[in-house]
Image: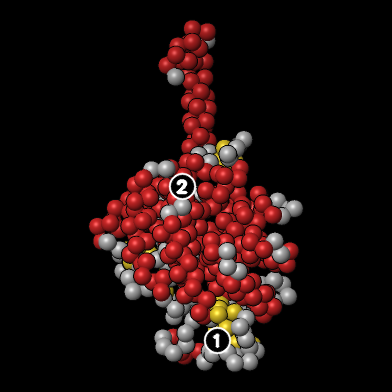
């Protein structure tokens, strides 16, 4: 700046120098302001800077990892008390996501600290591979042990996966054609008069079964997964390709008893995370079967979601697409993270590109409004997720599964667009 001033001072009369100096100051400050406002996570030629965002995520995850080691527990969310809340050590459907995030960091960095941590935290719930009273074994062991096996080829991890898959298929009812989601003999589920409830979330458990068939060369797991997907295809979806959350079946006859919700706004509403589970689940089903019906359903769900997201300024999903106060309803960042990760895989199978929508979603999630600064937000990566508004639980908080699918999306984006 001083050199510029000296140069012009030698050329201009003193009476004009002050005016020019002021103009230069405004110009340079304007440029600086533009540089500050320019988004550092986006490169005009290469798109979103996934490498930068993964390093940022690693910074947060590293801090959370150290806190979790001290407590010897798996972080889940932040409670109403403002304190870090942990996964229930007896059984928690979210317990696989934290070690799964660690596995993705190991895959990205090849730093053994992530591998060692992932192995340590997933060992905390290994005994749950024998658990037969819930459908969530796919969530838990696919995100943790299956990710670990894919990277390390550790045979012990494979054995854990197969045992978990065997436990999961005990919940399959051939008359219904589905895996039962919840037992209904206790808890709030017992109050709903359900017999054989199946939730759209259950589509996410099928990936473990597909992998188990590949590993064992036994088709029984895949056959059950396909039957479940077909039954869900038949009964869970409306004409506009949105899904009910819960379909309750008669366990003896296999007929549909009711179509309701547990976590959505109303029985006939489109709960956003449920739509994301369906999108992700049918994309996975197409990966393993190449059944065009599954691809078409995933594309239809994607179109429904993306059309609805246009109602929100940042193109993120409201927690339920039929909630009563749209556009003044909260968004669900977890639904957005699941959706964008699924779209990245679906984009590889579809004739129509989803790249613009993928970048819109990832860009929105990676802004200061939703992406935590290092050391903030109890060291979770993303802010503003929704667990269950009807249960008044985990509202506008970080969630370990939102972080997991965000990291997965960044890894997929980098592999797909920035090799």
Query: How dense is the environment of label 2, judged by Cα within 10 Å: few (below 14), some, or many (20 and up)?
Result: some
> What number is the disc on residue 237?
none
- Label 1 crowd (10 A; few <14 / some 14-19 / many >=20): many
- The extreme left residue here reads 70
Please determine whether, in this image, residue 82 is positioned above or below residue 135.
above
Question: What is the x, y in percent for residue 200?
Answer: 58, 74
Q: CA distance from mark 2 to mark 1?
A: 39 Å
Q: Which residue bears the numbered disc 1?
A: 196
Question: Horizontally, is 255 left or right of 389 in the view?
Answer: right
Q: How many marks?
A: 2
Q: Mark 2 or 1 closer to N-term?
A: 2
Instruction: Name the one closer to the observer, 94 or 355.
Output: 94
Res. 196 in view: yes
Report the residue at 71% width, 55% height from top. Answer: 350
- Element under label 2? helix
Quadrant for the N terminus, please.
Answer: top left
Q: Position of residue 299 (x, y in %)?
A: 70, 62
The residue at 41%/76% (across/down) is 131
Secondary-structure class at tag 1: strand
Which image quadrant is residue 394 in? bottom left
Identify the residue at horizontal 69%, vertical 66% (top origin): 294
Q: Is residue 109 left or right of residue 328?
A: left
Residue 172: x and y in percent read 55, 80
Residue 137's place in the image compared with 1, above or below, is below
Q: Residue at x 60, y 45 (%)?
A: 416
Determine which of the numbered discs, if any, sits on residue 107 in the image.
2
Residue 44 pos. (x, y %) = 60, 37
């Amino acid at each position: 700046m001083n050199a510029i001033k000296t140069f012009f001072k030698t050329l201009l009369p003193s009476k004009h120098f002050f005016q020019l100096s002021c103009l230069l100051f405004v110009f340079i400050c304007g440029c600086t302001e533009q540089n500050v406002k320019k988004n550092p996570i986006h490169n005009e030629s290469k798109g979103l800077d996934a490498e930068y965002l993964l390093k940022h995520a690693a910074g947060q995850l590293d801090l959370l990892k150290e806190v979790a080691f001290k407590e010897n527990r798996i972080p889940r969310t932040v409670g109403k008390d403002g304190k870090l809340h942990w996964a229930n050590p007896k059984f928690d459907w979210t317990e696989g996501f934290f070690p799964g995030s660690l596995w993705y960091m190991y895959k990205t960095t090849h730093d053994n600290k992530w591998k060692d941590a992932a192995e340590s935290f997933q060992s905390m719930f290994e005994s749950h591979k024998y658990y037969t009273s819930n459908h969530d074994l796919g969530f838990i062991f696919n995100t943790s042990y299956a990710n670990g096996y894919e990277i390390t080829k550790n045979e012990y991890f494979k054995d854990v996966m197969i045992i978990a898959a065997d436990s999961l298929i005990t919940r399959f009812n051939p008359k219904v054609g589905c895996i039962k989601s919840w037992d209904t003999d206790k808890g709030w589920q017992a109050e709903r008069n359900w017999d054989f409830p199946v939730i759209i979330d259950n589509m996410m458990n099928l990936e473990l079964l597909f992998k188990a068939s590949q590993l064992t060369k036994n088709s029984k797991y895949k056959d059950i997964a396909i039957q479940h997907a077909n039954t869900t295809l038949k009964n869970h979806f409306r004409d506009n390709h949105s899904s009910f959350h819960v379909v309750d079946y008669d366990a003896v006859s296999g007929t549909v008893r009711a179509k309701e919700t547990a976590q959505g706004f109303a029985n006939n509403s489109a709960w956003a995370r449920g739509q994301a589970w369906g999108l992700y689940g049918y994309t996975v089903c197409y990966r393993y079967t190449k059944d065009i019906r599954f691809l078409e359903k995933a594309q239809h769900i994607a179109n429904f979601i993306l059309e609805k997201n246009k109602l929100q300024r940042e193109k993120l999903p409201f927690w339920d697409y039929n909630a009563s106060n749209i556009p003044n309803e909260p968004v669900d960042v977890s639904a957005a993270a699941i959706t964008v990760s699924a779209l990245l895989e679906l984009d590889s199978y579809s004739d129509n590109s989803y790249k613009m929508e993928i970048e819109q979603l990832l860009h929105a999630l990676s802004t200061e409004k939703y992406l935590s600064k290092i050391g903030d937000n109890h060291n979770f990566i993303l802010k503003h997720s929704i667990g269950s508004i009807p249960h008044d639980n985990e509202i506008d908080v970080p969630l370990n599964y939102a972080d997991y699918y965000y990291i997965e999306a960044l890894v997929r984006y980098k592999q797909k667009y920035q090799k």
